[in-house]
Image: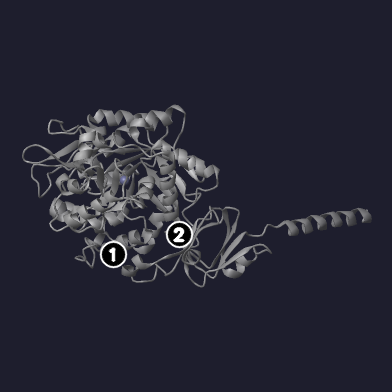
Amino acid sequence: MKQCSLQLIVVLGCAICVFAQNKPAADLIIQNAHVWTVDALHPEAEAVAVLGDRIVAVGSSSQVDAWRGPHTRMVEAAGKRLLPGFNDAHVHFTDGGAQLDNVELNDVTSAQEFARRIGERAGKTAKGEWLLGGDWDETKWTPAELPTKELIDPATPETPVAVNRYDGHMVLANSLALKLAGISAQTPDPTGGVIVRDQQGNPTGALKDAAQDLLFKVVPSFSHDQRRHAIERALGHAASLGVTSVQHMNPEYADIAIYSELLDEGKLTTRIYAAPLIPQVDDQAKIGIRRAFGGPYLRIGAVKAYADGSLGSRTAYFFEPFSDQPSNRGLLSDEMQPLSLMRDRMMRADGAGLQLCTHAIGDAGISAILDIYTEIEKTYGSRDRRWRIEHAQHMAGKDFDRFAQLHVIASVQPYHAIDDGRWAERRIGHDRASRTYAFRTFLDHGTRLALGTDWNVAPLDPMLTLYAATTRATLDGKNPQGWFPEQKLTIQEAIEAYTMGSAYAEFQEHEKGSITAGKLADMVLLSDDVLSIDPVKIRDVKVLKTWVGGRLTYDAGAASQ
Ligand SMILES: [Zn+2]
């Protein structure tokens, strides 16, 4: 008997000693950081331990040190601010990556400069090759007039040009491009689009919304290598800005194929959720793909729809006319004509379990989508759908309650507020402007926000978005205290919406969005403490390091060496 219990003790002792030897050590410990976790239970911490791609401990430096082993990589954060990685809820990732190499027209301030840069680029472009991109914004010009083909024709006789307005709702073509596309005075405006014409009825080269398709159908699409290059540029750019997840709105299937290829090669360094356009809803539906289908690096299962155009292109759809253009109240998109077309597609998407992300900017556009969402709920009953309205820019006062009751997520881009805020009030008047980019009003109604940029429509840099959300100081310097300052977010609210809010918007709030043990180790270390500095200075804050799943994807120290 005595012998027996001795044996038991030996066996037990061995089991304990084996356990102690096998207790896994962390692969990475970030210590002496100023951690804002976005985890309501433990908002602040000093250190984080990572094992594999997951966070395993968050706490004081001494608590987390228990995870240290002989091979643990130690990162000394020297008191710098550590946040969960940013999740940009609305990007056009391939276009953004391509734009990094395209002609840059966004900061142009005159028609002459616009023409000069296009001419310069055309000189370096092989004959017959298309000159694309640009992201021009005529509201920054003096005088602020739409460009015409006459401006760029002399310098581009052999180069077809299709340079887009920054919002993607207008493109300027030169004469050669119009000819290749067969667009002439006789071409009628397509449904949901406008061919801008001079007094004689000849196209000026500017094409709005659906009219752009007449042109883009003759622009050769990216080769595989061009597309992959653009996406690799975008991945590098995202890492350098602390963006660890993006939600790619209207990707082409070829983009998803490249993501899959990069994932296979271990080179996908930003997590992707892709939402292809709703006209192709049956493709995902017929193979049984549902919301957030996939793995931690690549998911699909949403569809992106368009209700209307943009404020900048005067194609956002309003109940009342534009204040400065009494005959125009905007345009419903071609997907909404007739409305039953959109309703049927959305019903099919919802029936298949796909998530709906709908671009709606004008108050009547938003209202029409809320009507359809209401109808779907009546037909199929309520469940956790996480419908989204992308932009949700100009709200009718009556719709805030309805928005909240349907649990619709407002997927918003604060940078647009400080950009469009320069001129929006002239276009829609004070009353409607007071419900524009109404982030505070959304929160007050219990609506969840997901933050993003709409890159390449706005810069991908999260610091600019945080700056915009917390200051609402328009880019022209005319509203230093904030344009409709009552709609400002606090820095904590803005960070939460940009991390947990965006994660929720893609059904991933249990996987990412906060620095919490068990979650994916997506984090960003910043040069300055965005939570305590004057919000005006947030735009100057730099990213020091970015980790995705515990992997260092950007290191400012290494980048500057
Ligand atoms: Zn967009």
Q: Amino acid under label 1?
A: Thr
Q: Residues within 10 Å of mark 1 (few under 14, many from 20)?
A: many
Question: Is residue 118 among what the camera can see?
Answer: yes
Pick whichever, 84 or 422, lies toward us.
422
Relative to 162, 525 lies left or right: right
Task: Inspect this view and state whether residue 380 appears.
Answer: no
- Count neighbours of disc 2 (C-alpha within 10 A) and say few if under 14, some if 14 to 19, many if 20 or more: many
Distance of mark 2 from mark 1, alpha carbons? 21 Å
Q: Residue at 19% across / 32% down in the picture? A: 190
From the viewer's perspective, tell me whether residue 321 is left or right of residue 3: left
Residue nearest the viewer, comparing 160 with 2 = 160
Q: Nearer the viewer, residue 550 or 59?
A: 550
Label 1, ligand 1: CB separation under 8 Å:
no
Of the residues under marks 2 and 1, which one precedes in the sequence? 2
- The residue beneath circle 2 is 38
Q: Nearer the viewer, residue 99 or 91?
A: 99
Residue 86 as seen in the image, left or right of residue 108:
right
Q: For the image shown, how many numbered marks are present on the structure?
A: 2
Residue at the location (47% across, 30% down)? 288
Q: Is residue 374 above or below residue 472?
A: above
Q: From the viewer's perspective, is 317 left or right of 280?
A: left
**Residue at the disc numbered 1:** 471
Q: Give the residue type at disc 2.
A: Val
Question: Please, what secondary structure does the residue beneath circle 2 have?
Answer: loop
Q: Position of residue 523 (x, y in %)?
A: 49, 59
**Residue 353 position within the rendered picture, expressed as x and y whole percent measured from the top left:** 42, 33
Quadrant in the picture for residue 426: bottom left
Q: Position of residue 182 (x, y in %)?
A: 20, 32
